[in-house]
Image (spheres, rainbow, N blue to C red):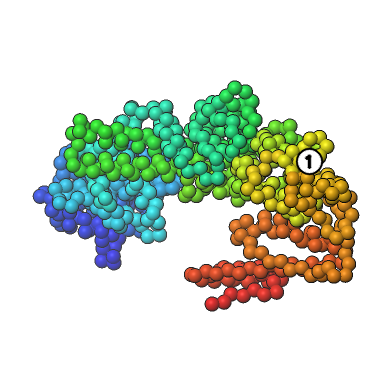
């Protein structure tokens, strides 16, 4: 490096290696004459780079270009003007269009100059061109990041007319590549409708993975294309309905609103079963461009025999078809990331629909990542408890008199946007079974009955498992269920309700309703201890249920003293990093943990 300064040794290696093999190139005089013109031009241009490298050679300067082409075939002049350097060249335009990234370093021009300088004199060599490491060695200055030049190289390879690629090796040649043919196909053979139809086709393929949704509907053209069903469903909007977070107006929200209100043949009833996924408006242009490139390369592959492609061109087409297909899939996943979740506040149930906009990312299938995000935020609920069901029924309220039927309750959850979105009816049925089996049903959940004749409930059950029976009757307010149980007990007809035995409220308790208290006295247990292992993902929800169903009941005793201890135990085969140890220890100290330590 010191001996060659201010010229990079790579430049001398190319001159005394590749260029000196040319018949008319003079090893010493030719090098001196070329470098004199290069240095003079860079001096006039006040070039401030640290070293003169192959990527620094100003091939756009006529005297420098003529010095390089005088030893080569005359056909290199249009190659330089089109793909290497100059105000009308592809690298110049790429740098100008991408000024915020690699353009400010003139990375595309420096890449193109390096490849030309290292490949033009060795067209007949068995191994052509330079590999990507040699290219970066010839153009990256000290202090610059090589990945930036890698991005410019990929852009150049995708669009250049005379730039060939075989694996990691690149070279310029006099014969145009099939890249130009692909560009022509992309520009003239495929319109916007063809591109959007291919996007719809790929969205259709994404329906096989539904996550927690019952079904996935893709690219509906009208509200009638989305059935009115009572399972939670994801509607992936077509490319014509995108979402722009920077503007108030959005074709995605407008169309989603129409789907939410209408269905085939009338107004939609199961409005709370729908969630929408839309493409990002800014990313949609890149997706469409990638699809157009894939369509072009696919058409060339289909016509490979009639086009008379040679073996190398066929390999290039195969590689490009695979590469562009992967690019389309990546951009499709990256573009469709806006979830439109319709909601309504409970204090304004007849007001306008409010759209909660959530951005989702990840490597899973579209429906999978959406369902995971919504489940985490409890906007999509695959499991529910009887306690939370009772809170919903009281809060709205959803009672129809002294009870509400299961069918009516499920219809409410399907219809009203201010209620939680349960994934399917089985979630409600399991919550009803859970609530009916609760020992604290008089205060926290409800009773269950099969029928009601206007004065009496048939099959009335509480504090008991429903067994294998699928709930299809009704849930009953606890105070009315207590009245019937007491009346049947007093009349000696307790078994007539349909259960084996009416639930007792304990000892000599008075049965005035859900707030009735048990009598206390000698011989009753005076201490309670319970222990449960929590799910590490949904533990906060379980803690709330435990507080409502157990702790609050115990605290009702006049002199009860409740002590709650949280124990956290974690194992990691790879060990906990120092940063994790430090953070946890500091947080535990702030939270005043009695014990907090890591051990081997």
**Which of the pair 557/259 is nearer the observer?**
557
Instruction: Judge by depth and name the residue closer to the eye, 37 or 136.
Output: 136
Residue 53: percent from left, percent from top: 29, 55
Q: Is residue 390 visible?
A: no
The answer to whether residue 427 of the structure is visible from this angle is yes
Residue 293, by quadrant, is top left
Q: Residues within 10 Å of mark 1 (few under 14, many from 20)?
A: many
Q: In the rendering, at what x and y percent does residue 51 appear?
A: 32, 58
Tell me what residue is drawn at x 77 percent, y 55 percent: 440
Q: Residue at x 39, y 52 (%)?
A: 148
Near-viewer residue (273 or 303)? 273
Is 177 situated left or right of 564 in this image? left
Number of numbered markers: 1
Q: Residue most toward the bottom?
A: 600
For the C terminus, the image quarter is bottom right
Q: What residue is disc 1 on? A: 457
């Amino acid at each position: 490096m010191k001996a060659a300064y201010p010229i990079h040794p790579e430049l001398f290696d190319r001159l005394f290696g590749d260029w000196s093999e040319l018949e008319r190139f003079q090893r010493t005089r030719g090098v001196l004459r070329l470098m004199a013109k290069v240095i003079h031009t860079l001096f006039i241009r006040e070039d401030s780079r640290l070293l003169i490298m192959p990527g620094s050679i100003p091939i756009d300067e006529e005297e420098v270009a003529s010095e390089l082409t005088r030893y080569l075939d005359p056909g290199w002049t249009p190659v330089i003007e089109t793909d290497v350097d100059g105000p009308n060249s592809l690298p110049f335009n790429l740098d100008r269009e991408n000024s915020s990234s690699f353009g400010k370093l003139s990375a595309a021009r420096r890449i193109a100059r390096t490849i030309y300088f290292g490949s033009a004199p060795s067209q007949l060599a068995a191994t052509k061109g330079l590999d990507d490491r040699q290219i970066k060695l010839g153009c990256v200055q000290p202090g610059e990041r090589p990945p930036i030049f890698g991005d410019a190289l990929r852009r150049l390879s995708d669009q250049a007319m005379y730039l060939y690629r075989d694996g990691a090796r690149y070279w310029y040649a006099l014969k145009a590549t099939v890249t130009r043919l692909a560009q022509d196909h992309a520009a003239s053979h495929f319109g916007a409708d063809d591109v959007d139809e291919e996007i719809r086709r790929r969205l259709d393929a994404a329906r096989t993975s539904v996550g927690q949704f019952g079904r996935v509907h893709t690219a509906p053209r009208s509200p009638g294309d989305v059935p009115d069903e009572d399972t939670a469903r994801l509607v992936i909007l077509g490319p014509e309905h995108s979402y722009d977070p920077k503007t108030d107006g959005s074709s995605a929200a407008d169309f989603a609103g129409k789907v939410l209100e209408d269905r085939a043949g009338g107004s939609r009833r199961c409005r709370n079963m729908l969630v929408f996924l839309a493409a990002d408006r800014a990313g949609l242009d890149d997706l469409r461009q990638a699809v157009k490139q894939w369509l072009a390369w696919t058409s060339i592959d289909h016509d490979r025999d009639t086009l008379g492609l040679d073996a190398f061109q066929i390999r290039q087409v195969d590689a490009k078809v695979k590469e562009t297909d992967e690019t389309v899939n990546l951009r499709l996943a990256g573009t469709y990331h806006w979830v439109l979740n319709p909601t309504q506040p409970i204090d304004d149930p007849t007001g306008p629909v409010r759209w909660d906009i959530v951005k989702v990312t990840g490597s899973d299938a579209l429906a999978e990542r959406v369902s995971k995000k919504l489940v985490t935020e409890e906007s999509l609920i695959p499991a529910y408890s009887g306690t939370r069901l009772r809170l919903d029924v009281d809060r709205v309220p959803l009672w129809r008199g002294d009870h509400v039927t299961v069918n009516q309750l499920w219809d409410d959850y399907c219809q009203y946007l201010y209620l939680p979105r349960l994934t399917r009816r089985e979630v409600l049925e399991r919550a009803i079974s859970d609530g009916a089996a609760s020992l604290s049903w008089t205060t926290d959940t409800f009773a269950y009955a099969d029928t009601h004749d206007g004065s009496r409930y048939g099959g009335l059950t509480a504090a008991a498992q429903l067994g294998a029976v699928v709930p299809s009757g009704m849930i009953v307010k606890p105070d009315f269920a207590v009245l019937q149980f007491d009346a049947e007990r007093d009349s000696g007809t307790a078994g007539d309700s349909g259960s084996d035995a009416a639930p007792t409220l304990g000892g000599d308790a008075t049965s005035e309703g859900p707030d009735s208290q048990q009598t206390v006295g000698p011989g009753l247990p005076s201490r309670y201890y319970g222990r449960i292992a929590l799910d590490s993902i949904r533990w906060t929800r379980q803690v709330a249920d435990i507080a409502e169903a157990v702790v609050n009941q115990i605290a009702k005793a006049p002199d009860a003293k409740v002590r709650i201890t949280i124990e956290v135990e974690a194992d990691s085969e790879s060990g906990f990093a120092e940063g994790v140890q430090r953070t946890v220890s500091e947080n535990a100290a702030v939270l005043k943990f009695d014990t907090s330590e890591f051990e081997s």
